[in-house]
Image (cartoon, rainbow, N blue to C red):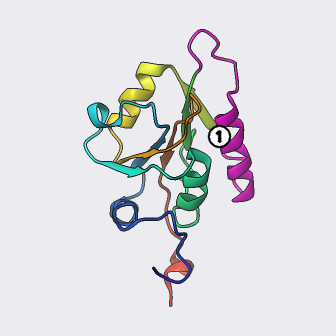
Amino acid sequence: MLKGIHPLLTPDLLHALASMGHGDTIAIVDANFPAHSTGRAVIDIAGASAPQVLDAVLSVLPLDTVAVPAAFTMEVIGDPDAVPAPVADFAAVLTEHALADCEVGHLPRHAFYDKAADAVAIVRTGEPRPYGNIVLVKGVVGHDLMRG
């Protein structure tokens, strides 16, 4: 255990996040997502919901302020304008992290699978609700924040 590190940030997840460069992506997905057949590296955090893991990740990961969109969710099949409960929860977490203005794109199912397959890692959560999936684009840590 480390001081100041969110307890959901496991060693494997911290390594994946620290290994990412500007523009790299990471996917946070629900328990039903075909993570192992989609991604190269899968990190399981079965004891947490997708919004809880998003909150933990955003405590250390800057989103890309230039990329539009800087995050992607999966569209509801047959109703692309629907906002499933997990996606509404993602918006609340983004707001809590002062990212309410961040543009979130919405991708059809298979396009989302393709985006997740290109991610540095897929973080599979214990989220039981469908459409609890989001891909984040990493930004840059400011030079002033890197000083000790």
Q: Is residue 121 above or below residue 31?
A: below
Residue 104 coordinates in the image, percent (x, y): 62, 37
Asked if the stretch drawn in magenta spans residue 94, the answer is yes
| Residue lying at 37% horizontally and 59% vertically, measured from the top left | 21
Q: Nearer the viewer, residue 53 or 95?
A: 53
Looking at the picture, how far across and down is residue 56, in whole percent? Answer: 56, 61
Q: Is residue 11 magenta?
A: no
Near mark 1 (Cα within 10 A), the count class, few <14, some 14-19 or many ≥20, is some
Q: Amino acid at mark 1?
A: Glu
Q: Looking at this rendering, what residue extends furthest in the bottom direction?
A: 148
Which quadrant does the N terminus fall into? Answer: bottom left
Please determine whether, in this image, residue 64 is positioned above or below residue 73: below
Highlighted magenta segment, given as a residue range: 76-102
- Residue at 69% across / 59% down in the picture? 97
Most foreground residue, 108 or 102: 108
Q: Residue at x 38, y 50 (%)?
A: 44
Residue projecting furthest to the front: 47
- Which residue does the numbered mark 1 point to in the structure image? 103
Residue 49 in the image, given as x and y percentages of width and height = 57, 47
The quarter holding residue 98 reads bottom right
* Residue in view at x 52 percent, y 69 percent: 7
Regarding residue 138, the answer to whether it shows in the image is yes
| Nearer to me, 77 or 137 | 77
Q: Residue furthest top?
A: 78
Q: Viewer-proximal residue, 59 or 11?
A: 11
Q: Is residue 65 visible?
A: no
Asked if 129 appears above or below 110 in the picture, the reply is below
- Residue 40, how many percent across, how many down? 25, 42
| Disc 1 element | loop
Q: How many marks?
A: 1
